[in-house]
Image: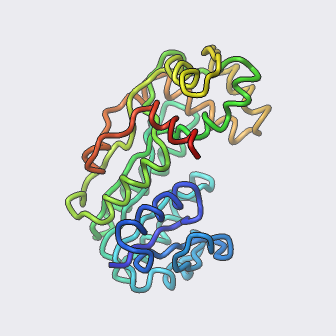
Amino acid sequence: MKIAVTAANGHLGTSIVNELKREIGKENVIGIVRTPEKASHLGIEIRKGDYNSRDDFNTALKGIDSLLLISGMDDPQKRIQQHRNVIEAAKQNGVKKIVYTSIIGDEEKTAFSPIVKSNRQTEKDVRESGLNWAIGRNGIYIEPDLEYIDTYTKEGEIRNCAQDGKCGYTSRKELGFAYTQMLIDDKHNGQIYNLVGELITQTQLAEYINQVFHTNLTYKSVSVEAYENERKEELGDFIGTVIAGIYNGIKIGVNNVHSDFEKASGRPHKSTIELMETFKKK
């Protein structure tokens, strides 16, 4: 069985590729990337595939049994057609199954909603493709917070607009494990899974970071407007607005969802402390 992974050289793609290599052998894993020379380190066959090019995917998906479609990073409106290019090429090439990496979120209530909405449209396109399918809705990755620890330490606090909303953080490594099971086991066909870990507040996040990394952080809540202005100033309008939208979503309970991780992967999701310990060992 040949399994292809799009955006295979990204953080999530790499994690999934590494798990698949362990499960089915590197000779059965194909990476599809926009710039093949940037993916040689993966140690698998690499094919060229730009989400904007249907022709790329008509070639890249030849001889593929199952496909892991990682959600693109472009403007939300452009993503829908980009993903359709891949889905249509999969149908044309006789791919039997698509697994799609979607996202937790609300379609209407935050500045992050346009991205969620485009993901929901691709979920619909995948479900209506006529192929076998499975969909994961990813929780928020823990890694960006942990990579930001130096800044948090300098400022002495984690500051955002999530207030006491709960969020089920996950990690790319956990997701890599879950998606691999979803790809290779047909019992997951036709399922949509929330791929999240334990539900914690930002105050708990600060406490866990203190415990594992021996920091002395507190959590400071600010208004959505103040946080959005701060993020836009640092990251630019688009990314700043999106980040503020994510934390606003946590505040209003959008990320307070039940976890299907164990159903998807066959084992419980690691605790937040375990995710941090794993990150620290890297």
Q: On screen, 98 above or below 176?
A: below
Is residue 95 or residue 122 the one in the foreground?
Answer: 95
Instruction: Determine whether, in the image, residue 5 is placed left or right of residue 79.
Output: left
Instruction: Determine whether, in the image, residue 25 is placed left or right of residue 224.
Output: left
Q: On screen, 92 above or below 280?
A: below
Q: Residue at x 67, y 21 (%)?
A: 225
Where does residue 108 sit, x and y in percent of width and height?
47, 35
Task: Specify the quadrant that holds the N terminus.
Answer: bottom left
Q: How many marks?
A: 0
Is residue 36 or residue 217 the one in the foreground?
Answer: 217
Q: Residue furthest right?
A: 233
Q: On screen, 14 above or below 162?
A: below
Instruction: Determine whether, in the image, residue 133 is placed left or right of residue 47.
Output: left
Q: Residue at x 53, y 37 (%)?
A: 142
Q: Residue at x 70, y 19 (%)?
A: 226
Where does residue 68 sit, x and y in percent of width and height?
42, 65
Where does residue 167 sit, x and y in percent of width and height?
45, 28
Is residue 90 or residue 149 the one in the foreground?
Answer: 149
Q: On screen, 259 above or below 203?
A: below
Residue 270, by quadrant, is top left
Q: Residue at x 45, y 35 (%)?
A: 274
Where does residue 170 sit, x and y in percent of width and height?
45, 40
